[in-house]
Image (spheres, rainbow, N blue to C red):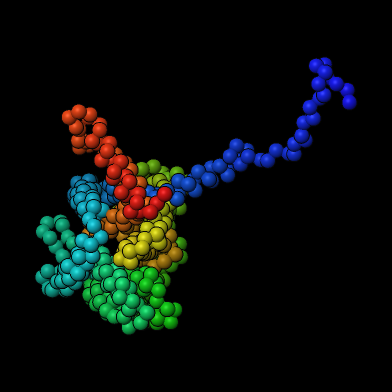
Amino acid sequence: MPGSRTGRPPVQRAVRGPAAPRASRDNPVRRLHTRLQRAWDRPLTAYYLILGGSLLIIVLGLVMVYSASQITALQMSLPGSFFFRKQFLAACIGGVLLFVASRMPVKLHRALAYPILAGAVFLMALVQVPGIGMSVNGNQNWISLGGSFQIQPSEFGKLALVLWGADLMARKQEKRLLTQWKHMLVPLVPVSFLLLGLIMLGGDMGTAIILTAILFGLLWLAGAPTRLFAGVLSIAGVLGVILIKTSPNRMARLACIGATEPKTGVADCWQAVHGIYALASGGLFGSGLGASVEKWGQLPEAHTDFIFAVTGEELGLAGTLSVLALFAALGYAGIRVAGRTEDPFVRYAAGGVTTWITAQAVINIGAVLGLLPIAGVPLPLFSYGGSALLPTMFAIGLLIAFARDEPAARAALARRQPRFGRKRGAGSPAGPRRWNTMRRRASVARSSGER
């Protein structure tokens, strides 16, 4: 073997195989997917999705209410910002309710279930008293509070059913009674039918559909067997068919599904068709904020039930997809909270609120798109209406409280140092504060069991 210049034998290097691909450097798509998955699995993801998504929906809804209601207010000889100011006031009050609900412990939420249910039943019965209840658009579901302020008690019935039903099913699960079908149905189904009966006395079938969806959501979360679930669904379906067949107005709404031109006769489909016109004229990015044409008297209820159509006309496909994405994120976060908790009340309540908001959004948007009959329900957190906004914001506060109450989320929130109210010692300003913080971190980490 020939030697080298130094007289030493040459060093034989090992033959290396082909280099393994580095996913972190050579595959940016996989690297991005990994980062998104890590961010998605963080303990506070649901908390931020619920808080940020709901606030964005409320703010965008205020903007669209102001844009969509100006012409209606001027036609009624009112200031152009009349409906916006009322909605803004309701949003401020709802913000207080949201904050209070998000800071309340779970035990206090359970304690409020029966008082809220009793108050909702009393107000819904008070609606049917002559001289107290008011009729709006053919539905006797309102109570006047003086001046231009009104309240719709059936909206608070949704919150009452969620809280009371969650507390009832949680107590029965703790006693292991949900394995018997009679304990699963009684008294949940009779009380739900009582609320539905009070609502249907006023003729508001849209709100009755939402309450039925909440009932089915609670039964599904409780693990109702297929036969029991199908039985309750069949009874509700038969009652729904009877109520639709006996009302020409509801039959006319059913006939307007998929309509593209106004019809003559009972089913004129004017509102449904002009909602499609508004969406079709929006294009990709819309005609511009405030530049809607349909809100100039062509589209009825432009700032309430059909505000999504005005959003599509002024903000285009991009605006409507953004609203859908926000509701999808809110629904995912609610399902995540319900699926990761070990508290039965939190699971039932979070599932009930998620079912409520998701079902109402689907029914409203489906009606605007012409895929479902017009049920007369507002878009949650978005449409004009303080009676609908207040209980919905309180329900969002419930979800935020439940998201904060997860063990991993509590540990992540406890690791944050408060920015205000720091206590300083006499010798070392940061000494006592740092010791208290570390002790709190250690105790929270041991109690939560998270690494």
In the image, residue 56 lies at what x, y percent? 34, 47
Q: Quadrant of residue 139?
A: bottom left
Q: Residue at x 81, y 21 (%)?
A: 8
Q: Nearer the viewer, residue 233 or 32?
A: 32
Q: Residue at x 25, y 33 (%)?
A: 431
Q: Quadrant of residue 145?
A: bottom left
Q: Nearer the viewer, residue 83 or 291?
A: 83
On the question of residue 370 being in view, the answer is: yes
In the image, residue 216 lies at what x, y percent? 37, 72
Q: Nearer the viewer, residue 438 or 285?
A: 438
Q: Quadrant of residue 210?
A: bottom left
Q: Nearer the viewer, residue 173 or 68?
A: 173
In the image, residue 123 lies at what x, y percent? 16, 69
Give the residue furthest to the right.
1
**9, above or below 118, in the image:** above
Give the residue furthest to the front.
7
Counting the numbered discs, the total is: 0
Q: Residue at x 21, y 53 (%)?
A: 100
On the question of residue 403 being in view, the answer is: no
Q: Residue at x 19, y 32 (%)?
A: 425
> In this rendering, would 1 be left or right of 223?
right
The quarter of the image holding the N terminus is top right
In the image, residue 120 lies at what x, y percent? 19, 68
